[in-house]
Amino acid sequence: MSDGSAAFAVSTGEPIAKAVTARPPARRLPTEEAPWVRRLLIGLAVGFLGLFLLLPLVTVFMEAFRKGAGAFLAAFADPAAVDAVLLTLLVAAIAVPANLVFGVAAAWAIAKFDFRGKAFLVTLIDLPFSVSPVVAGLVYVLLYASHGLFGGLLQSAGIQIIFALPGLVMATIFVTFPFIARELIPLMEELGNADEEAALTLGASGFRMFWTVTLPNVKWALLYGVLLCNARAMGEFGAVSVVSGHIRGYTNTMPLHIEILYNEYQFVAAFAVASLLAALALVTLGIKSWLEHRYAGDLAAGHRH
């Protein structure tokens, strides 16, 4: 402290320690929002999520148990409900592995190679994001129904696509295809080809290179894509509704069964099945969050790689 500052402190009777520790008020950075702006934005975000996401979700579970656990369990005593649950799980069990193979192959081709038509392939991958699922279902009907383009050939061969399990699977694959590929493409492009080229230089085969080099590098993005694809597959309504024919106990998945129950004014049963579907989605989200928390270090290391 300078002599002038000390003399001023003594003359005013202010303690020297207080005069020394006094600091000018902190100034807000030009890019930093004012406190009231931060509070307003946080309040808007929380209010939006609560009104449009949390409240409807809570309402589903409240309505499902509105008449007690007995009425909730009675909804699943209906054989049609059991068939809808099993069919939903079966469709997802077929569609997700198929999209896993297609998504990895498409991401590999786009990220690792340059070829004519690459931009068109990327556009095709994004197509389900821009096309209505109902339109996709109608296209499958025009192609594979008995009066469709390939319907005659399929019917003569004894193969039924529309109003059967194959149509449900195909429609689900269409609407869920981008999820895995879109998770993998940016990461594969960022990683480049250096690791694969080094593995090939050391004598690794293409199959071994994929399993020991490429797959470990993209495993977390692949897992996220699979989780999102599975959640979307179980909840798909539009495309599946068009190709299913709404045959109770045969082609009705859980979303379609919920619609039928609601239209028949069986509200408790409808919300009971809806709560199971919501619970499956929450389990998927919980697994994703747990993986992010449990393997945060590995995720950060993989991103830096």
Image: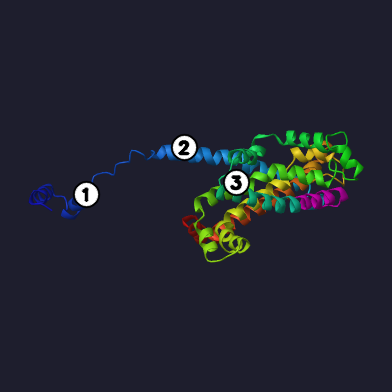
Secondary structure at badge 2 equals: helix
3 and 2 marks in contact (CB < 8 Å): no
Give the residue type that dot 2 points to: Leu
Viewed as shown, does residue 295 lie left or right of 53?
left
Secondary structure at badge 1 equals: loop
Q: Which mark is residue 50?
A: none
Question: Badge 1 local density, few (<14 within 10 Å), some, or many (20+)?
Answer: few
Secondary structure at badge 3 equals: helix
Q: CA distance from mark 2 to mark 1?
A: 32 Å
Q: CA distance from mark 3 to mark 2?
A: 34 Å
Q: In terms of sequence position, does the residue under pointer 3 or pointer 2 come before the other? A: 2
Residue drawn at 67 percent across, 39 percent down: 128
Q: Which residue is mark 3?
A: 182
The part of the chain drawn in magenta is: 72-91
Where is residue 195 shown, x and y percent of the image?
51, 59
Is 220 rendered above or below residue 164? below
Which mark is nearer the camera, 1 or 3? 3
The quadrant where residue 24 appears: top left
1 and 3 marks in contact (CB < 8 Å): no
Which mark is nearer the camera, 2 or 1? 2
Q: Which residue is mark 2?
A: 40
Question: Badge 2 local density, few (<14 within 10 Å), some, or many (20+)?
Answer: few
Q: In terms of sequence position, does the residue under pointer 2 or pointer 1 come before the other? A: 1
Q: CA distance from mark 1 to mark 3?
A: 55 Å
Where is residue 196 shown, x and y percent of the image?
54, 59
Q: Which residue is mark 1?
A: 22
